[in-house]
């Protein structure tokens, strides 16, 4: 098997960095659960009513509040498995993996931009910006000439 070009190596590194940043987002979701609930409640009149009458504890225990931590954890596990599988296929020279990773990155940019536009706590804005930049970097590495040459030959 021939040597992988730097663009493939950097694409795989970008994928691993995306997984790490996603893990940081899950950890932040757990650590700043109340802050996320408060940010979510800003646009919800029912949540505001519960918050005003019973405080954050009542809102946290309310059935209307999404289960942010389990959702983040399941999303993280699915994302990491996807990244590992697609990264392995890309490194092995399968061109279709580049297309799927490009689509996944576009979806990642969309999700990250939502994180930037919803009045979340500052650490989430930083994680969202980092995730967005890593998605753009991944697409850059995926569509470099040396990546195309490597995928064409394999």
Image: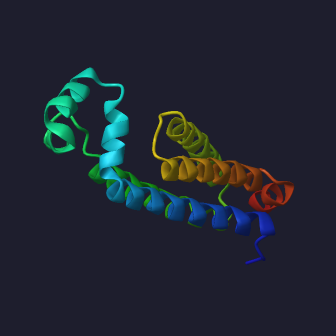
| Rendered location of residue 83, percent (x, y) | 52, 59
Q: How many marks?
A: 0
> Measured along the vertical axis of the image, is residue 114 above or below residue 45?
below
| Rendered location of residue 69, percent (x, y) | 30, 52
| Rendered location of residue 43, percent (x, y) | 36, 25
| Rendered location of residue 140, percent (x, y) | 76, 51
Tell whether 72 sits left or right of 5: left
Q: Residue at x 20, y 25 (%)?
A: 49
Evaluate whether residue 96 shows in this view: no
Q: Is the C terminus in the top left, top right, bottom left or bottom right quadrant?
A: bottom right
Looking at the rendering, which quadrant does residue 31 occupy? bottom left
Most extreme residue toward the top is 45
Tell whether 145 sits left or right of 13: right
Tell whether 147 sits left or right of 35: right
- Which is more toward the observer, 26 or 103? 26
Q: Residue at x 39, y 61 (%)?
A: 27
Q: Is the N terminus in the top left, top right, bottom left or bottom right quadrant?
A: bottom right
Evaluate whether residue 39 shows in this view: yes
> Measured along the vertical axis of the image, is residue 20 above or below residue 110?
below
- Which is more toward the observer, 92 or 103? 103
Q: Residue at x 14, y 36 (%)?
A: 54
Q: Residue at x 23, y 29 (%)?
A: 47
Tell whether 107 sits left or right of 94: left
* Colour style of the rendered protein structure: rainbow
Looking at the rendering, which quadrant does residue 152 occupy? bottom right
């Amino acid at each position: 098997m021939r040597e992988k070009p730097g663009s493939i190596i950097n694409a795989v590194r970008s994928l691993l960095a995306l997984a790490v940043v996603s893990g940081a987002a899950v950890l932040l979701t757990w650590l700043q659960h109340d802050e996320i609930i408060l940010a979510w409640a800003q646009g919800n009149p029912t949540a505001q009513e519960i918050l005003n009458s019973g405080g954050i504890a009542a809102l946290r225990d309310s059935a209307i509040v999404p289960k942010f931590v389990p959702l983040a954890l399941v999303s993280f596990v699915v994302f990491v498995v996807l990244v590992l599988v697609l990264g392995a296929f890309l490194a092995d020279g399968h061109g279709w993996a580049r297309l799927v990773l490009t689509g996944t990155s576009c979806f990642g940019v969309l999700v990250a931009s939502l994180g930037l536009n919803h009045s979340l706590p500052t650490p989430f804005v930083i994680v969202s910006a980092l995730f967005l930049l890593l998605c753009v970097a991944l697409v850059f590495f995926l569509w470099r000439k040396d990546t195309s040459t490597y995928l064409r030959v394999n």
